[in-house]
């Protein structure tokens, strides 16, 4: 059927179409902003930038300065054991954590997660660690504090298997500070070249993604190590989170913009 429209009807239709187009173009950017805001809102800040409320720590080594958590060893406060500042928000299972960090050249530190307490020492944790050091020898690797030691060097994707049943002591299956059940699956890149992406004496961003038995460590947006932990005897699927100051010479490490997303 052929329809006939008056001039007035055509003008009305055109006007309505114009209004609809304007409304659509005006609303689209807003919807995109809301989407992006939603994605950001998934992350929650767990440090207020002003105090250490919500954290457990030894005040000799931990403080707040210039909006950052500061861990420091001075000539007068040399450590006998590694010490940690521990988040009091409970155990984390599957999560993402983004943290900006700065570390002095002589510094040795790390982000501890899915850990339990090593009760023989005050403020001590035992478990997975995203390693950080000022010389960038270890930054980005997965090191298990007080347990299986190195689970993936920087530039490695690994599969972790259990020790034989004949070995009951975990440290009995460690050699040269690495777990014997470390099986290389894939090279993620050259270790030195990946290290060059980490800025010495400046702020960097570390991003941990832990989901199920897979743990990924990113630094400045680049995947540095990936562990698939199939060691049902020793792995942890949830636990405490904190930051480390390692025994050694005087040093300083700072953490800010600490953002957590539970998965």
Image (cartoon, rainbow, N blue to C red):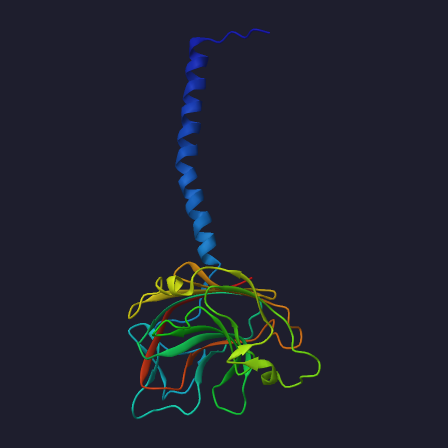
Q: Residue 74's spot in the image, x, y percent?
A: 30, 88
Q: Quadrant of the N terminus?
A: top right
Question: Of residues 212 and 56, which is closer to you in this image?
Answer: 212
Q: Position of residue 38 (x, y in %)?
A: 47, 53
Which one is nearer the viewer's eye here, 174 or 263?
174
The quarter of the rendered structure image containing the C terminus is bottom right
The reply to whether residue 33 is visible in this rendering is yes
Q: Quadrant of residue 198?
A: bottom left
Left or right of 218? Residue 114 is: right
Identify which residue is drawn at 71% across, 80% down: 165
Instruction: Give the image quarter of residue 71.
Output: bottom left
The residue nearer to you, when weighing 143 against 94, is 143
Q: Residue at x 46, y 61 (%)?
A: 43
Residue 95 place in picture, x, y as percent: 53, 65
Indicate whether 85 appears above or below 21. Answer: below
Residue beneath the point at 60% across and 85% down: 172
User: How many labels, in total?
Assistant: 0
Decide: is 241 above or below 228: below
Query: In this orientation, does residue 209 appear?
Result: no
Would you say 86 lies left or right of 116 here?
left
> Is 243 left or right of 232, judged from the image as shown?
left
């Amino acid at each position: 059927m052929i329809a006939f429209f008056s001039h007035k009807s055509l003008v009305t239709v055109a006007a309505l179409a114009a209004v609809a187009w304007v409304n659509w173009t005006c609303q689209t950017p807003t919807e995109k902003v809301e989407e992006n805001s939603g994605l950001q809102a998934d992350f929650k800040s767990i440090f207020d930038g002003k105090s250490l409320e919500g954290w457990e720590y030894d005040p000799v080594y931990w403080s707040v300065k210039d909006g950052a958590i500061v861990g420091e060893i001075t000539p007068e406060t040399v450590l006998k054991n590694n010490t940690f500042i521990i988040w009091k928000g409970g155990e984390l299972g599957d999560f993402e954590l983004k943290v900006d960090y700065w570390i002095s050249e002589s510094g040795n530190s790390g982000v501890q997660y899915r850990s339990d307490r090593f009760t023989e020492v005050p403020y001590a944790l035992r478990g997975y660690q995203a390693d950080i050091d000022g010389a960038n020898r270890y930054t980005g690797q997965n090191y298990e504090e007080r347990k299986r030691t190195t689970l993936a060097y920087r530039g490695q994707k690994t599969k972790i298997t259990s020790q034989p049943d004949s070995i009951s002591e975990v440290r009995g299956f460690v050699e040269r500070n690495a777990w014997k059940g470390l099986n290389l699956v894939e090279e993620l890149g050259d270790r030195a070249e990946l290290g060059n992406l980490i800025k010495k004496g400046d702020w960097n961003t570390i991003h941990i993604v832990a989901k199920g038995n897979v743990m990924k460590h990113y630094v400045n947006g680049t995947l540095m190590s990936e562990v698939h932990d199939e060691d049902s005897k020793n792995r942890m699927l949830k636990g405490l989170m904190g930051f480390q100051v390692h025994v050694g010479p005087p040093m300083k490490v700072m953490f800010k913009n600490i953002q957590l997303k539970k998965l």
